[in-house]
Structure formats: C-alpha cells, structure tokens
C-alpha cells in the first residue's frame, strides 16, 4: 500500500484530461478526476468489500490528507461489520424520523390550548348569555383561577391544580366562594370535555362537600329589636347617605341588592308609587313591579335629594355607570368587623347587631319574614319576592298576579317598619323570634 501512496508532489501534478481518471492512493482510496468536458472536478472514493461484495463510497474530504483519515475511519467500521453505505441510509432514515417526531410534537404543542384560551372560548360561548355577560365570573377567574392555572395547557391540568385554587380560598376564610369557584371551574372543564378538547374532567373526582365542609343554607333573619337597633346605629356608621337609603329600601321591598344597584330613575314612578325591575335586572329574567309603601317612597325621595345622575339611582366612583352590588355589601360588611380599616376604623363595629353578622340579602329574608308574621299569605309573599313557582302544575295553570294583594303586603310591611322606626325604648310590642321565611 505504501508503494501506491501518492507523494504530495505527485498529487499536486494531477490534472484533468479529456478522459475521466481514477488514480489509486493505495488501501482502496482513489482520486477521481472528471474529464475536462465535465469540469475536471477532483473527488475521493473508497473501495471496500463487505460480505464478499465490493462497495464504493464517495468521501466528503477535500484534501488528500483528510481523505486518507476518512478512509481509515470507514475501514475501521467495515472491520466491525458495519456497511458505511447502509449506515448512511439508516442515519438518513433516523434523521427523517426525528424530524417527523419533532414536527409532530410541535404540531401537538400548537394544538394545545391553555386554560386561559379555554376560559375565553367558554366565556364567548356560554357566559355571554348571562345577564351581566359573564363580567362577575370573569372577575372571579381573573382574581383566583387564571393566575394559578391560566398558563397551563388544558390537557396538563390535574386534580392537584384545582385543589391549589380552592385551598388558597379556604385559607382566606371564604369557604362559600371556594365552593362556588369549584362549581364554575367544573362547568368550564365539562365544556372542554363536550368539545373533545380534553378527554377527562380534572374536577370530576373532587367532591364539593369536601371543599370547606358541608354547605349550610343561610337563614339569618334580623329580629325587630335588631331593626330598631339598626335605626339607632346607622346615623353614626359614617355610611354614604345613598347606602343608608339602600338598606331601608331592600328591607321594605324585599328586593335583591343586585336589582337595586342597577335601578334607573326612569323605572321609579313617584305618582303611581311603583318601581319596575325590568327583566334584564331580575334574577329570574322576569319583570317585577314593586308597589311602594309610604315608608319606601320616603327613602326614594330622600335618595332623589342628592341624586348624581339622570339615569342611575346609585352611581359608581367613575360617574359613568351604576354602582357594583359588591360595593353596598362591602360597606355593610366593613362595619361589622373587628379588623382595623383604613380611615374608618372607628366605625368598624358600627353595624354589629346582637344576632351576629348580617348581609344585604338577609334584609330580603327579614322583610319576607315580617310579612309572614303580619299574616300575609305565602303565595303573596312569593309574588313579592318574584320567585319562580317551583310547582310545575301551579306554574302552568295558576297565572294570577295578585297585584292588589302584593301592594297590601308591602303597605303592611312599610307600616310595621315605620312603627319600629318611631319606637324609642320599649313602647312597641315586637313579634316573637322571627321564623324562617
């Protein structure tokens, strides 16, 4: 082999001719020189035998020294029984398969949607049909859900991610909110299952009863003694005057705080003494007319004295829309807490009553209970509350509105509240401990 090796000088003198040349360098290495007509290019080839068959392999080297090194490397492979030509094909196939796998993974990742993407799709499809367009649910998700799992792929969400959300709420002491958010998150993931975005709902095995303990139906009713105390305490509670009016309106009409916060002046008829709650503001989607007692009418007239808008009874801070119902509830809650509150700590217990903490919704329940104690029939009270009749037969066949009876019920409730408001000391006989409405 040594005698066949080209010297550097001999290699440098190689020239293209009119015929293609194959010049041996020994050890199976050949220098291939194309004809002048084909451009005269110089390349290297290695000739070897494997399994008794002769094979040729084109080398990638550009210099004679590099070609000899490449030849020796291939020769070592052949000695181990590896066919370089076949190995190249296998390597090409491996690279092709790798590329296909990488492309498939990329496609898979691109197809995966995040929880935030899912929420937006759910919101656009389902939540927009709710009365508020899903604004309240979006607020809750933006605060307590999406910061934790919003960036995760929907398919990657596990049970532990959900309990991380609910545990954070339980640590804040808002057990009912934890249950509500679990219910909403479950709705969202079931939406995803229905559309084949995921195969399994990660909330399916989480029992609602295990989140914050068993739910207890709230039954707080203010006693008449507490209502009298509320009259005495409200003036010193540093409340916004409109909120004071709101408290008495909710108690005397049994309306919901959300219905009152969205009330418009155009729906108040001071002459007919009525307040219309339109279908878009009522919980059951049905319009509801409240016949105002003199007691309630006085509160609306007081409210009109410092009205800030020609549209809304209760304006928000931006002076562009109605106040959020959470605002009224927060003002009531902040005055029943032992915590220090910025610039109004002296009022933190101003609305604390002997029966314990109360909410605006408890005023609705209290008003209905007083109606019952005054002898108002249950069917009339249900009409005043604008409840949907649960009995299907009655709902279909008994369509009477009982308007006169409702007006009388609100009148009696107003007179009772007026009596409690005028009473000082103990000169009014109160009802026994209020029963549940």
Image: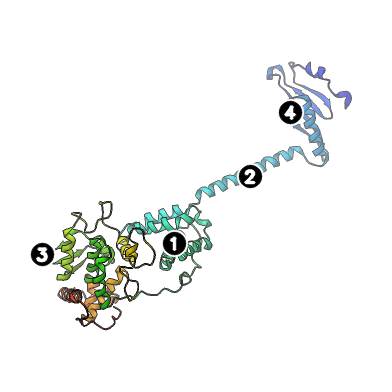
- The percent coordinates of residue 15 (x first, y second) are 76, 16
Q: Mark 4 highlights which residue?
A: 61
Q: Do the residues labelled 3 and 1 touch (CB within 8 Å)?
A: no
For this rendering, which residue is in front, 128 or 431?
431
Check whether the beta carbons of the residues at disc 1 and disc 2 lie within 8 A of each other.
Answer: no
Residue holding disc 1 = 185
Q: Residues within 10 Å of mark 2 (few under 14, many from 20)?
A: few
Callout 3: helix, strand or loop? loop
Rendered view: 153 above or below 163: above
Disc 1 packing (10 Å; few <14; some 14–19; many ≥20)? many
Residue found at the far left of this picture = 271
**Which residue, given by chain and number where applicable, does mark 3 sit on?**
271
Q: In which quarter of the image is residue 271?
A: bottom left
| Mark earlier in primary sequence (1, 2) | 2
Mark 4–mark 1 Cα distance, whole angstroms, equals 63 Å
- Cα separation, mark 4 vs mark 3, equals 103 Å
Label 3, label 1: how far apart the Cα atoms are: 47 Å
Check contact, mark 4 vs mark 1: CB within 8 A: no
The Cα–Cα distance between marks 3 and 2, rounded to whole angstroms, is 81 Å
Question: Disc 2 designates what residue?
Answer: 98
Mark 3 or mark 1: whose residue is earlier in sequence: 1
**Which residue is rendered at x = 51% and y = 60% of the image?**
161
> In x, y percent, where is residue 186?
44, 63
Which secondary structure, mark 1? helix
Q: Distance between the residues labelled 1 and 2?
A: 38 Å
Q: Tell me which label, 3 or 2, sits earlier in the chain.
A: 2
In this picture, residue 368 sits left or right of residue 291:
right
For discs 1 and 2, the disc positioned in front in the rendered view:
1
């Amino acid at each position: 082999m040594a005698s066949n090796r080209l010297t550097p000088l001999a290699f440098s003198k190689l020239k293209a001719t009119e015929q293609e040349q194959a010049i041996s360098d020994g050890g199976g290495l050949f220098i291939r020189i194309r004809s002048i007509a084909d451009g005269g290019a110089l390349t290297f080839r290695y000739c070897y035998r494997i399994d008794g068959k002769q094979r040729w392999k084109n080398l990638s080297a550009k210099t004679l020294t590099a070609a000899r090194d490449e030849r020796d490397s291939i020769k070592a492979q052949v000695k181990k029984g590896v066919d370089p030509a076949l190995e190249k094909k296998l390597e090409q196939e491996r690279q092709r398969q790798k590329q296909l796998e990488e492309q498939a993974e990329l496609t898979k990742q691109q197809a995966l949607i995040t929880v935030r993407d899912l929420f937006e799709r759910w919101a656009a499809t389902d939540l927009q049909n709710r009365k508020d367009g899903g604004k309240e649910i979006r607020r809750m998700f933006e605060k307590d859900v999406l910061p934790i799992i919003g960036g995760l792929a929907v398919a990657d969400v596990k049970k532990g991610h959900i309990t991380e959300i609910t545990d954070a709420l339980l640590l804040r002491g808002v057990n009912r909110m934890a249950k509500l958010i679990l219910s909403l998150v479950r709705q969202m993931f079931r939406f995803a299952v229905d559309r084949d975005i995921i195969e399994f709902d990660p909330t399916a095995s989480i029992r609602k009863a295990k989140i914050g303990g068993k739910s207890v139906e709230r039954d707080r009713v203010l006693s008449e003694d507490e209502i009298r105390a509320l009259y005495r305490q409200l003036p010193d509670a540093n409340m916004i005057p409109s909120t004071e009016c709101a408290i008495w309106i909710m108690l005397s009409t049994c309306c919901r705080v959300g219905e009152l916060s969205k009330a418009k002046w155009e729906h108040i008829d001071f002459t007919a003494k009525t307040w219309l709650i339109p279908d878009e503001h009522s919980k059951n989607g049905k319009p509801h007319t409240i016949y105002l007692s003199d007691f309630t009418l006085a509160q609306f007239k007081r409210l009109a004295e410092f009205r800030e808008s020609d549209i809304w009874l209760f304006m928000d801070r931006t002076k562009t829309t109605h106040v959020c119902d959470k605002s009224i509830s927060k003002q009531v809650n902040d005055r029943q807490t032992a915590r220090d509150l910025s610039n109004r700590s002296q009022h933190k217990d101003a609305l604390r009553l002997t029966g314990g903490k109360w909410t605006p919704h408890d005023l609705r329940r209290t008003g209905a209970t007083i109606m019952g104690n005054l002898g108002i029939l249950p069917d009339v009270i249900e009409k005043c509350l604008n409840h949907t009749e649960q009995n299907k037969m009655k709902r279909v066949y008994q369509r009477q509105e009982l308007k006169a009876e409702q007006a009388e019920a609100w009148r009696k409730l107003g007179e009772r509240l007026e009596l409690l408001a005028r009473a000082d000391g103990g000169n009014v006989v109160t009802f026994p401990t209020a029963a549940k409405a």
